[in-house]
Amino acid sequence: MKIPKIVTRNGAVALFAAVLLLHSNVMAGPPLLCEAFEIGSAKSLPWQGPDWTAVRPDYDGSRLIDDTLALLNAETPVIVRMETLRRATVYVRKDPKLAAALLSRLKARAHEAEARGERNALALFDAGYLIETYRQAHAISIATREEYWKFSQDDPGKDPDGYGLVLKAIQYRGKDAEMEFAAALIAAEGKRGYEEHLQRAVAGARDGSLLARNLERHFAHRGKGRPVFASK
């Protein structure tokens, strides 16, 4: 079995420079919501088409919490978790009770793990990432007058620091380039540490991986040319 090589130091630095150069052209909207994450053939919540709000109108919303929790199992890659939580946020955009219930379940799962002394990085990540996604959805609701997007959840500013939970998850996991990618997207909204997160995400990208494809999609797809990743 051929094992992919980690991006070389020179390649990582070159790609890092490229994505930083293109950063100002890419972040046109809330980055956790306005661009879908590429997940290949991985399973997530039902979706139709490439649009970032392309929910399935026939999806039974009463199943959303159970479906989401089932999808966020220990085997699910971080980027697939990010897309699942993004889709869940779009589904609950006009249902404040459902939005609150989903967040409550994820926070409870993280708190229970901490109370048992478990270093459950994925539970912390899911709760923190959803808090930050809700925060961006709330900002969209304030900025738009369109009835299609009215995120009715209370101001997520009252919630714990989701970014802080993601940082704690990274600390628990050790080196995790996909979590660094998530942290970079959160930090791109004005938080310190953006460049460091992005640099670590790029350094851990493997050619052809979900991470490499999403780095290109979210940071470099509007630029001139394609970042060069190390070959497998």
Image (cartoon, grey):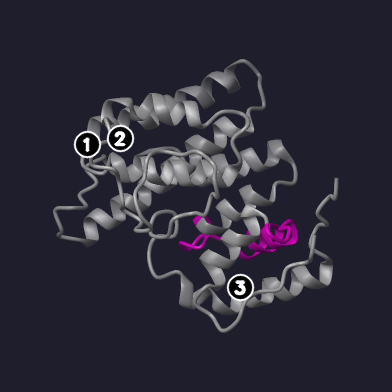
- In what element is the residue under mark 2? helix
Residue 95's label in the rendered image is 1
Q: Which mark is residue 19?
A: 3
Residue 182: x and y in percent read 56, 52
Horizontal and vertical percent for residue 70? 48, 26
In magenta segment, residue 204: yes
Camera-side residue of 84 and 14? 84
Whichever of labels 1 and 3 marks the residue nearer the N terminus, that label is: 3
Percent position of residue 230, x then y: 78, 66
Task: Examine the rendered structure and indicate whether residue 7 appears above or below residue 15.
Answer: above
In this view, the residue in front, 110 or 44, is: 44
Residue nearest the viewer, comparing 159 with 64 = 64
Corner quadrant of residue 158: top left
Q: Could you say whether the residue bearing mark 3 is in a helix, strand or loop?
A: helix
How busy is the neighbourhood of tag 1: few (under 14 within 10 Å), some, or many (20 plus)? some
Q: Quadrant of the rendered structure where residue 61 is?
A: top left
The correct choice, above or below, for 45 with respect to 25 in the image is: above
Q: Check if residue 156 falls in the magenta segment.
A: no
Q: Quadrant of the N terminus?
A: top right
At horizontal 61% and vertical 41% (from top left) the residue drawn is 77
Is the Cβ of the residue at disc 1 closer than 8 Å to that at disc 2?
yes
User: Residue 99 has which mark?
Assistant: 2
Residue drawn at 54 percent across, 45 percent down: 41
Question: Mark 2 is on which residue type?
Answer: Ala
Q: Which residues are magenta?
A: 186-208
The answer to whether 230 appears left or right of 41 in the picture is right
Residue 64 shows in the view: yes
Establish if 112 lies above or below 15: above
Q: Amino acid at mark 3?
A: Val
The mark total stands at: 3
Kind of residue at disc 1 = Asp
